[in-house]
Image (tube, rainbow, N blue to C red):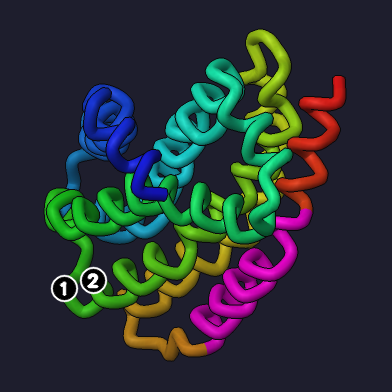
Amino acid sequence: MVRDLVIAFRHPSDLVNPLIFFMIVVTLFPLAVSPEKQFLAQAAPGVLWVAALLATLLSLDMLFQSDFQDGTLEQLLLSPQPLYIGILAKVTGHWLLSGLPLTLLSPLLAFMMFLPSEALPALMITLLLGTPVLSFIGAVGSALTVGLRKSGLLLSLLVLPLYIPVLIFSAGAVQAATVGLPIIGHLALLGAMLALALVLAPLAIAAGLRISLGN
């Protein structure tokens, strides 16, 4: 994980591009639809979460591709160390470089979208719970397509349908918070998704890597 963080900071464009994309999507929305304050406040939960989802998708290229090209990925599979731990470290590194910065940036964009202040904690909590799930699911798709040329479209087709539950419950929690409704049910479901992703996704990622490198 430390190696991935060092490499990412040596290539700041890989680190900054998803954040710029996140900001552009959110700032263009009022220009394209309506700058009216009440409308933006109602649309903010969905817009912020869709933008975060697409920015995470954009960042998946840096997950396995460079390791595949320089042979590090093959060494990881052949290493005597538990593959589960190695994959868990790589996905954690990806979240630290993509999901966490998006979460930290979200209050500024929420302010621009006139999201009510009482919904801001819900937005932050859903991003902290939901973006790791996006990284795990994305890593499964990235592992399956790492050996393919021009795999971006196929990766999107594989991953986007699996992102839908996270999007629904996360945006739903923020929307409920804006009108004062309880959000504990939404958060419990997001927590359950994260727990399942922690346990099952590394196994699926390992299988995907073995299939890709076996070809």
Would you name the residue on which mark 1 appears? 117
Q: Nearer the viewer, residue 43 or 24?
A: 24
Would you name the residue on which mark 2 appears? 120
Q: Residues within 10 Å of mark 2 (few under 14, many from 20)?
A: some
Q: Is residue 194 magenta?
A: yes
Q: Residues within 10 Å of mark 1 (few under 14, many from 20)?
A: few
Task: Judge from the rendering whether residue 53 lies leftward or rightward of residue 159; answer left or right.
Answer: left
Find numbered disc 1 in the image and state the secondary structure of the residue it sits on: helix
Does residue 68 lie above or below 45 as drawn?
Answer: above
Does residue 205 lie above or below 154 as drawn?
Answer: below
Q: Which residues are magenta?
A: 185-203
Marks 1,2: beta carbons within 8 A: yes
Residue 25 visible in rendering = no
Residue 83 tag number: none
Q: Nearer the viewer, residue 200 or 181?
A: 200
Quadrant containing the C terminus in the rendered view: top right
Q: Is residue 213 magenta?
A: no
Q: Quadrant of residue 38?
A: bottom left
Q: Amino acid at mark 2?
A: Leu
Residue in view at x 43 percent, y 46 percent: 94
Task: Judge from the rendering whether residue 65 lies leftward or rightward of residue 96; answer left or right.
Answer: right
Q: Amino acid at mark 1?
A: Ser
Residue 176 visible in rendering = yes
